[in-house]
Image (tube, grey):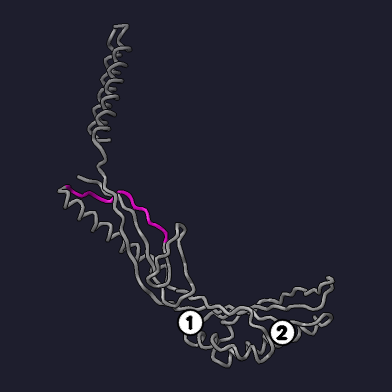
Amino acid sequence: MSWYIIAILVAIVIGTLIWLKWSKNPYAVLAIGLIIGISVFSLFFYQSRQGDTSLRVVGYSSKLFESDLVKWNITVQKYVPSGGITGGYKSMNADVKAFKDYLVKQGIPEKDISIKPISSYNQYNNQGQVVGHNLNQSLFVLSSELDKIEELALDPGFIADRGMILQESRLEYLYTELPKLKQELLADATSDALARANEISSSAKTGLGKMNQARAGVFQITEPYSTDVSDYGIYNTSTRQKSISVTLTAYFKLK
């Protein structure tokens, strides 16, 4: 609503109050009420005829980047016959400890290796009798030495040599500077939105005012050159090389 229109309405109200104070006419209130009603109606009619004086544009930014941290998730499994679960636990502990020592010898710091407790579930025969137990134990390695972890993950021979089943071996690639990267992308998307708004207003021969509202979309972190998008955002950790993108919807006043 324009300031000069608001000033006119305020002046009408003040003038009305002053006039009512000195007027002795019993129909004065009705007349003044009619005047104010017409003024308000005229104001909204005027506003409805003005149309939308803002410009909405969508800025976009994307970058390719490389992960600087990897998480190696490992789950090993060992089968023991019925009645041998106690020995199975000891054997599993020994095997996992040996695997941890092996990783340390390969240059992985012990602080980067985390081991979870053993879990187990029974195996039954067709008669419903327990015939054995499957023992599972998970551990993960969190490291910035991506090449070394990839080399170890592709060579599961040590686990196989000790009679353990490798149930899972999965690499998750992460990026420690992600918050900073997101800020850079938002700045780039804002600049892109401003450039688009300037281009549109220049072509339409209208003046571009200040940005009065902006709304950032969700970040899409995918494998390079992927077309995948999600309303809730994506964070693909399966690839070392990644692409990140974001949109920013901006609203500008037109002069």
Q: Which residue is mark 1?
A: 144
Name above or below for residue 39 compared with residue 103: above
Let me know if residue 180 appears in the view. no
Please name the residue shown 27% across and 17% down the image: 35
Q: For residue 44, what is the image quadrant? A: top left
Q: Quadrant of the N terminus?
A: top left
Q: Please, which residue is most extreme toward the left here? A: 205
Name above or below for residue 144 compared with residue 128: below
Number of labels in the image equals 2
Q: Which residue is mark 2?
A: 93
Q: Secondary structure at mark 2?
A: helix
Q: Which residues are magenta?
A: 206-218
**Amino acid type, callout 1:** Ser
- Residue 36 on image: x %, y %: 29, 20
Q: CA distance from mark 2 to mark 1?
A: 27 Å
- Residue 159 on image: x %, y %: 64, 88
Q: Quadrant of the C terminus?
A: top left
- Residue 76 on image: x %, y %: 66, 81
Let me know if residue 145 appears in the view. yes
- Residue 206 on image: x %, y %: 17, 47
